[in-house]
Image: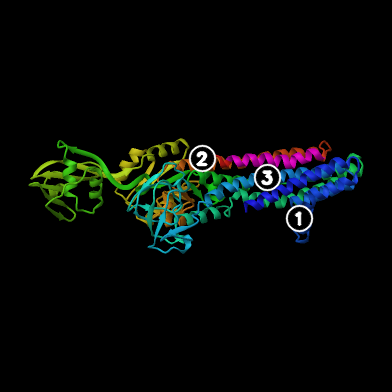
Amino acid sequence: MEHNYEKEKRFIILRIIISLIFFGLGFLYPILFILAYFIAGYDIISRAIKNIINLELFDENFLMSIATIGALCIKEYPEAVMVMVLYQIGEYLQDKAIHKSKKSINDLINFRPEYAVVNGRRMQPENVEIGEVVTVNTGEKIPLDGIVVEGSALIDNSMLTGESIPIYAEAGKEVLSGGINLNSVLKIKVTKKYEQSTVHKIIQLIESSAEKKAKTEKFITKFAKIYTPIVVLIALVLALALPAVLNIGYSEAIKRALTFLVISCPCALIISIPLTFFAGIGGASNNGILIKGGNYLEQLSKIGTIVFDKTGTLTTGVFGIREINSCDSDILKYAAIAESASSHPLAFAIKNAYKNEIPETTEILEDAGNGVKALWEGKTIKAGTAKYVGVKPVNTLGTVIYVSIDGSYIGNIVLADVIRDDSEKTIKVLHDMKIRTVMLTGDTQERAETLKNILNIQDAYAELLPADKVSKTEGLMQTTQLPLAFVGDGINDAPVLKRADVGIAMGGIGSDAAIEASDVVLMEDKPYRIITAVKIARKTMSIVKQNIFFALGIKTMFLILGGFGYMTMWGAVFADVGVALIAILNALRAKNIK
């Protein structure tokens, strides 16, 4: 594909060079101007003729052809040739810019694994079944989602998440397709077919993103269809009316009308506006943010309210120790011993917090919903509720585990859902950006209020079922003129993600629901990526507006000058090709947002 592209570009350069040679010789032998003209512009004329046959008039090919053929008819040979040559140079440079932008997207698409190694044999990832074990050597891409069953290694997930720091994978850990094994051999048991794998879904999302056009893109397309026949009609009026109105010859009037036509080509808008959205989506992808189309990018730039789900979004959804209240430094050890056989999330939090090896116990008795009792080295350890341990409960936020030794109370451990590191910073910056923040949760009102105060969220609604979250979101949408975004973890928030103006799934890299239900997928569990997404969207839309005002402003000025005879055909070429090139170079800035 790349080879064919380079071959086509070399052919265009050769045509331009040959045309310029005949153009120079044309001043000695005028007939060579005609040859130079057709070498430079035969494809433009051919497309114009095909469009006329198909009744698709008034595109840039039609405008260029009618203007330059008219110039030849009034013996303005050099101008006619140079319009075609410069137009081809402009098209070449435009195509290079578009190709460069597309290549950044294709680079993401090309992180598709080419093969999977099963029992020492290479095969297509599409042919690997769930449960089979694939071997991934150093430097190879992980072909399918799965669980590591043997080995340990650092995995580079930067093409998936935008995060440059490798993750450590060992036996029992889930790994995702598209990651690169950096330093050791891994054996991975496949958990998803290729069609359901992370890498395949991301590729599908990227490939389809360009299909969903923003309102601005649709407007420009409609505008061009109305604008072009109007300027052709104006050019015709100029050619017929100027001799009578300004007392000039028909030759000069036709020349002005033809110059007017060249200036009027809407190339700058038709090419640069879609390219800006395309570049913005590419720039977001480079930052680990997948935006499903230009329409969502445009909506994201106007966001006035962001509604957050609590668990798994602003918090990790995993319990951690908030505080330890005890005069005994071994309280965490005793609690870990008591909870050593439990599979409860609170027990996992205590065992994870105790970094040392947990001593074995001779006996553990569990009282479901109340606590556990363990015998260790002749001591009776109890951990659980205040009633179970036999003490007065304390008033604090979080879940409290009370601990006693041989009936003597030694203190408590407070556990709570861990707040993400960048949640507070994210909320602060959103407020600086004049964006309202709201939190919805199924948790208790007390816990919701506490988190609201810690993070300085403006509004919080608690004890909500999934259906309640949808109705609450709809109510919030009715109170604002600006678009509303909902941010969730993509697993149990699918209904709200669908209902919001923009659904943002955070950390949805392994979640089927996230990719299917949301409009924007943040590839990492980092709320601050939302700030990056909004800034990219705002900058992209800023560039779109710059290009619209610049192109229309310059063309309007040049059209007026051309109509009154103050603009030559050379100036007309700049108004068309030059303006388009400047707009395209400006559009590409949307790709380079850090």
Q: Measuring 45% from the left and 39% from the top, which residue is drawn there? A: 430
Determine the image quadrant of residue 334: top left
Q: Which residues are magenta?
A: 569-589
Residue under circle 3?
94
Residues at discs 1 and 3 in contact (Cβ within 8 Å): no
In the rendered image, the vertical position of residue 546 relative to residue 55, given as above or below: above
Is most of the magenta stretch helix, strand or loop?
Answer: helix
Magenta region includes residue 573 = yes
Going by the image, does 549 lie left or right of 331? right
Q: Measuring 60% from the left and 46% from the top, which residue is drawn there? A: 101
In the rendered image, the vertical position of residue 327 relative to residue 97, given as above or below: above
Residue 244 visible somewhere in the drawing: no
Q: Measuring 83% from the left and 47% from the top, which residue is drawn there? A: 37
Q: Nearer the viewer, mark 3 or mark 2?
A: 3
Residue under circle 1?
47
The mark that comes first in sequence, 1 or 2, is 1
The amino acid pointed to by label 3 is Gln
Determine the image quadrant of residue 583: top right
Assign a secondary structure to mark 3: helix
Residue under circle 2?
535
